[in-house]
Image (spheres, rainbow, N blue to C red):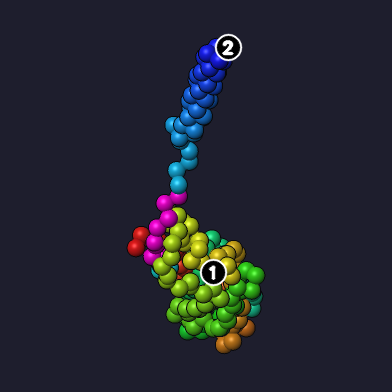
Amino acid sequence: MMAFSVQGLQRKVQTIGAAGIIVAAALSLVAVGPVLGGGPPATQVGLYNVTFPISNGTAQGSSGSAGFFSMAEAAVTIDQANLTMVIMHISYVDNSLSPLFNPAVTATIQGPDNSGSATGPVPPGQTADFIIAINNDVPPNTTLQAGSPEEAIDQATPDDTNTTAGMGEWTVTLDVGAPLAGRVRPSGSITYTITVDIQYFEGAAEKA
């Protein structure tokens, strides 16, 4: 009886051992599966030097004509982001018969959403330069950790940066008079030209 019990017990132990091996093998396969399947690559965080250099550019200007004792309005569209300065150059040609008497011309400039304004005379035979600073501070250069150049620039740009300040339609109003001989030749006119220069900043990031 005792021998039979021992052999039965040994068979039970062997059976349990075999089952344990099978379970262990199954667990091993489950554990290996995700490793073999792989996953999304980890973001490579690096150190970046971020700068905000100033660039120069131009915008499409305008031109037209206006009679004496009248006001002419011209629209100038600027579609550049991160503006810091707008410079408008305004000049005119007197179309009257005599070049000796030039009309008095005054320009008034107004930016979209009160982003900037200027006013002043346009001297005859000269180009008047109207320099308008945009209230949009250039972010300071910095060094930081990020997962990409785009992320680095985004982190380095302050939340209060108004990237769209000055973007949109600017209005230029020309007040044309004729103080000297205008009453003698009230049908006189001018042809005006407006050209536009701009300054703006753009972010750039390079690995340190």
Percent position of residue 172, x then y: 59, 72
Question: Taking the image as drawn, is residue 151 in sight?
Answer: yes
Percent position of residue 202, x then y: 45, 64
Q: Secondary structure at mark 1?
A: loop
What count of labels does the image hold? Answer: 2
Would you say 130 lies left or right of 174 here? left
The part of the image, by quadrant, that contains residue 206 is bottom left
23 or 105, nearer to the observer: 23
Judge depth for marks 1 and 2 and give the one in front.
Answer: 2
Percent position of residue 166, x then y: 57, 68
Q: Earlier in the sequence, mark 1 or mark 2?
A: 2
160 or 148, nearer to the observer: 148
The question of residue 67 being in magenta is answered with no
Q: Secondary structure at mark 2?
A: loop
Where does the magenta region start and end?
A: 43-50
For residue 144, which numbered disc appears in the image?
none
Furthest toward the bottom, the residue is: 180
Q: Residue at x 58, y 67 (%)?
A: 159
Say which residue label 1 marks.
Answer: 158
Q: Residue at x 56, y 76 (%)?
A: 135
Q: CA distance from mark 1 to mark 2?
A: 88 Å
The amino acid beneath tag 1 is Pro
The amino acid beneath tag 2 is Met
* Image quadrant where one finds the N terminus: top right
Q: Residue at x 42, y 51 (%)?
A: 44
Q: Residue at x 34, y 63 (%)?
A: 208
- Crowding around mark 2 (Cα neighbors within 10 Å: few <14, some 14 to 19, many 20+) is few
Q: In this picture, is 173 found above or below 78?
A: below
* Magenta residues, dominant SS class: strand
143 or 192, nearer to the observer: 143
Say which residue label 2 marks.
Answer: 1
Would you say 117 lies left or right of 56 here? right
